Amino acid sequence: MASANISKNIGSVLDAALDAGQGLLRLSPNWVPRSFLHPGKRIKLHPDDWYALGGHRGGIDERWFASTTEAMNENRADDEGLSYILFDGKRFLLRDAVSEAGARMIGKTMWEQYKRWPVYSKFFDNMGPIPHHMHQGHKDAALVQQEGKPETYYFPPQLNPVGNNFPYTFFGLAPGTSKQDIRRCLERWNIGDNGILDLAPAYRLKPGTGWHVPPGVLHAPGSLCTYEPQWGSDVFGMYQSLVEGRVVPWSLLVHSMPEDKHQDLDFIVGQLDWEKNIDPDFKKNRYLEPIVDQAASGEGYTDRWITYGDFDGKQLVSAKELTVEPGVKLTLKDPGASGWITVQGHGRMGKLNIESPALIRFGQETEDEIFITHEAAANGVVIENTGCEPLVGLRYFGPDTHKSVPQVGDYRK
């Protein structure tokens, strides 16, 4: 039976859902297409549904988690990118639920500062590489009434049985590159390949590792399926004119720039964080490997930091991976809300079943995604593996949730 959408007067339904789930909320799969990319086909969407929104919209290559952020796609649906809560045959937006019960959902401090859940995560899955691009910082994004977009990457082994066409990512620019070099690439936009990758180093991607990517840093993500905790924004600028023979229109370069600057090459180059792009120790300062959180682990279960590190001294987004062995039960306590996605196994979280499905039809509801409210996190969430393989879940957190998080490079200690 299909669920009914409700958008107004959700207070009583939300209260009932929070009480019934003891602060845990079931979320519906949230699929997002990208017209300029080719799906990598590893995020468990049924093969008949990769183009469920129509060929003109492009293939579905992303699934967003616990999102109150809209996808800034052309010709998009009004609710594209927004996550829905499921309860008692009804569907309502997580964004509306946070607006209705802010402190109960995300904690008093975060609610008072942001008045929203200011982060989200996604599976980002493509057959090949995407253009060398960057996401604006808060100052530049504010020029188009948006927010900046720091982000982090983790490559879940469960979703990377194959590397697809190009499991390498170009990051930043080679030391010694000048702003004039990039300006010349922009001047060559309409002649085919503008040559920007000639100026960029590439790194082989490894499942079970990740990267820390500040705003203003160029990156051309390779073809591993990526779990991507990030700030709640969808701003970007694509600086590469041709990818795998596909033309990248100028409109995607200036997508998140003021209209009167769309032909201002110096302005466009100036949106890059130059020092971070040409950092000679880029990998040392950006590469991540999991770090076991000993205080949150115990016999039969291990909690690992998978994305971490501050952005210019600010804790904005972080993520952990919990692995629970068969037959093990634990009480998970976190200092704040999180978005959870199950990537392996099945079991229970509080009163809710959790399992990682093998295949999902577009529009089908699943039992793999949950929003763990601040209330539930503070009280403690009982998680039990009732299967015969490890139960693995990824969860991400918003700003200043933890007293501290590991910093980039701490995995070496």
Image (spheres, rainbow, N blue to C red):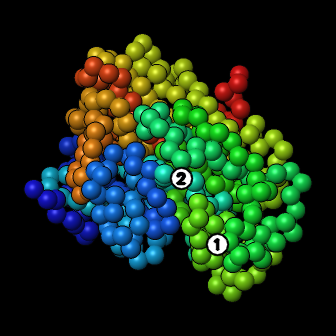
Q: Is residue 111 above or below residue 202?
A: below
The C terminus is located in which quarter?
top right
- Residue at horizontal 27%, vertical 44%? 359
Residue 78 position within the rendered picture, expressed as x and y whole percent measured from the top left: 36, 73
- Residue at horizontal 30%, vertical 37%? 356
Q: Is residue 265 left or right of residue 125?
A: right
Q: Amino acid at mark 2?
A: Gly
Q: Is residue 12 above or below residue 155?
A: below
Residue ID for mark 1: 253
- Between 381 and 342, the one lying in front of the other is 342
Q: Is residue 250 above or below residue 53?
A: below
- Between 58 and 273, the one lying in front of the other is 58
Q: Amino acid at mark 1?
A: Leu
- Residue at horizontal 82%, vertical 51%? 174
Q: Residues within 10 Å of mark 1 (few under 14, many from 20)?
A: many
The N terminus is located in which quarter?
bottom left
Residue 303 position within the rendered picture, expressed as x and y whole percent measured from the top left: 48, 26
Under tag 1, what secondary structure?
Answer: helix
Q: Is residue 155 left or right of residue 351?
A: right
- Residue with the most extreme top position: 299
Q: Residues within 10 Å of mark 2 (few under 14, many from 20)?
A: many
Q: How many marks?
A: 2
- Between 206 and 380, the one lying in front of the other is 206
Residue 239 position within the rendered picture, expressed as x and y whole percent measured from the top left: 68, 66
Q: CA distance from mark 2 to mark 1?
A: 19 Å
Q: Is residue 39 above or below residue 249?
A: above
Q: Kindly tell me whether residue 318 is visible in this rendering.
A: no
Residue 139 position within the rendered picture, expressed as x and y whole percent measured from the top left: 69, 68
Within the image, what quadrant is residue 250 found in?
A: bottom right
Query: Which numbered mark, 2 or 1, is in the foreground of this view?
Result: 2
Residue ID for mark 2: 128
